[in-house]
């Protein structure tokens, strides 16, 4: 991964190579607003105890885990994020993302920031809310042209 930019790493086949600074500024600003709304929804979710008594197992990691849940289908697993922050000196990953991905993340977080409180009001199970978030993140990845990561086939050991 050394030598590749985040754009190349995440959206290699998307073909986004140039940025219009004015447009990027507006996309980035909208993304910040969506992110603020999404963090408020995460706060509600981490405080939520569902009808089965399930609650956040680690509230201190809730923001990181739920963000990774959205990023992972886009090719940004926690391992990749850690690598980029430590080795490529990317403190804020969004400052290095292509416009289309920033826009899609903004829409995703905006939608989820409305959907999560509604799901809580409907007393949805936490597992259902998390599954919905994962599904929506996968749809966003597909929209951005990011193919799902192939899982290696597990082979049985012969005895």
Image: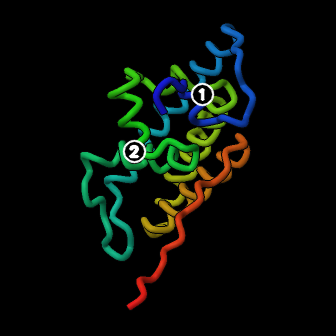
Label 1–label 2 contact, CB within 8 A = no
Q: Residue at x 72, y 43 (%)?
A: 145
Q: Please state the horizontal and vertical placement of residue 53, each as a whole percent of the image.
A: 31, 73
- Sequence-wise, the earlier of marks 1 and 2 is 1
Q: Quadrant of residue 14?
A: top right
Q: Residue at x 47, y 50 (%)?
A: 69
Q: How many marks?
A: 2
* Mark 2 Cα-neighbour bin, 10 Å: few <14, some 14–19, many ≥20: some
What SS does tag 2 mark? helix
Q: Residue at x 24, y 46 (%)?
A: 60
Residue 78 disc label: 2
Instruction: Provide the residue designation for mark 1.
Output: 7
Q: Residue at x 36, y 26 (%)?
A: 87
Instruction: Report the Cα–Cα distance between label 1 and label 2.
Output: 17 Å
* Mark 1 Cα-neighbour bin, 10 Å: few <14, some 14–19, many ≥20: some
- Front-lying residue, 97 or 129: 97
Question: Would you say 129 lies left or right of 105 here?
Answer: left
Residue at the extreme bottom: 159
Residue at the extreme top: 22
- Identify the image quadrant of the C terminus: bottom left
What SS does tag 1 mark? helix
Would residue 32 be seen by someone viewing this image from the given angle? no
Q: Please state the horizontal and vertical placement of residue 156, each as a whole percent of the image.
A: 45, 83
Residue 127 disc label: none
Would residue 139 be seen by someone viewing this image from the given angle? yes
């Amino acid at each position: 991964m050394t030598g590749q930019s985040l754009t190349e790493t995440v959206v290699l086949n998307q073909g986004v190579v140039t940025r219009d600074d004015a447009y990027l500024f507006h996309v980035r600003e909208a993304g910040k607003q969506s992110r603020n709304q999404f963090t408020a929804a995460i706060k509600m979710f981490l405080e939520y105890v569902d009808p089965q008594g399930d609650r956040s197992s680690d509230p201190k990691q809730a923001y990181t885990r739920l963000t990774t849940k959205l990023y992972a289908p886009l090719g940004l697993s926690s391992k990749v994020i850690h690598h980029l922050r430590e080795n490529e000196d990317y403190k804020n990953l969004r400052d290095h993302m292509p416009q289309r991905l920033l826009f899609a993340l903004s829409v995703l977080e905006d939608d989820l920031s409305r959907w999560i409180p509604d799901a809580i009001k409907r007393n949805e199970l936490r597992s259902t809310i998390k599954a919905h978030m994962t599904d929506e993140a996968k749809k966003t990845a597909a929209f951005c042209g990011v193919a799902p990561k192939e899982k290696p086939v597990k082979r049985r050991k012969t005895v």
